[in-house]
Image: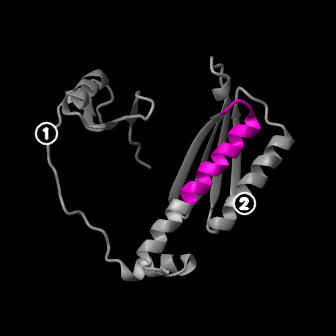
Amino acid sequence: MELQITGKNIELTPTVRHFIERKLSKLGRHLPNIVEYKVEIAEEKTKSPQQHFVVQVTLDSNGTLLRGVERGEDLLTAINKVAAVMNRQIEHYKGKLYEKGRGSSFARSELMEEAAQPPRRVIKVKRFAVKPMSVAEAIDQMELLGHDFFLFFNADSEELNLLYRRKDGNYGLIEPELE
């Protein structure tokens, strides 16, 4: 298991690193096949003291990514909150595996899932013409359609891009890169 801890606008002491390691190691008891943890901690200048520290945890469990973000008035509170969120997400994920395994134990359900479930397949294909447009035009089109995402050909970068609405009401843009 690999643990990456990064800080933005904050110096991370060994005590904080040890606290994070201890909290996240408890998650490994519930989901034993975690490959990697990424922890990003930021200190922000906000008007609300309850949202001063932001902790984001992303864990990789053999290709399944679980992510949690929490804010707190102090760093340890934010870490505790995000650990609780990650615990709930793991329980939710395990519940899905349990249901797919039709009542088998968690350890066996992943194997049964692969063997018992038919492979998922594409059942619908949509085709639509894409015309070159700017990001601003794509936002307008997405809003007119009432969708949460919009695929378009970016006239500036001359590539297909995906525009999506974030939970905070802003927009995100995905620009693919070939490896």
- x, y percentage for residue 42? 67, 31
Mark 1: few/some/many CA within 10 Å (<14, 14-19, 20+) = few
- Residue 129 - label: 1
The disc, 2 or 1, on the residue closer to the chain's N-terminal end is 2
Mark 2 and mark 1 residues within 8 Å of each other at the beta carbon: no
Q: Nearer the viewer, residue 32 or 162?
A: 32
Q: Position of residue 36 (x, y in %)?
A: 64, 56
On screen, residue 147 above or below 36: above
Q: Is residue 53 visible?
A: yes
Q: Residue at x 74, y 53 (%)?
A: 23
Q: Is residue 54 left or right of residue 157?
A: right
Q: Marks 2/1: CA distance?
A: 49 Å
Q: Quadrant of residue 76?
A: top right
Residue 77, position in %: x, y? 72, 39
- Decide whether residue 109 is among the magenta residues: no
Residue 5: quadrant of the picture: top right
Question: Badge 2, how many Cα within 10 Å: few under 14, some, many 20+?
Answer: few
Disc marking residue 26: 2
Find the magenta span and give its range: 72-90
Image position of 132 (left or right of 17):
left
Q: Is 87 contained in the magenta span? A: yes
Which amino acid, mark 2?
A: Lys
Q: Amino acid at mark 1?
A: Ala
Looking at the image, is 147 positioned above or below residue 139? Answer: below
| 169 w.r.t. 40: above or below | above
Q: Nearer the viewer, residue 84 or 148?
A: 84
**Secondary structure of the residue carrying numbered label 2:** helix
The label shown at residue 39 is none
Please name the residue shown 65% across and 24% down the image: 44
Residue at 29 percent across and 32 percent down: it is 158
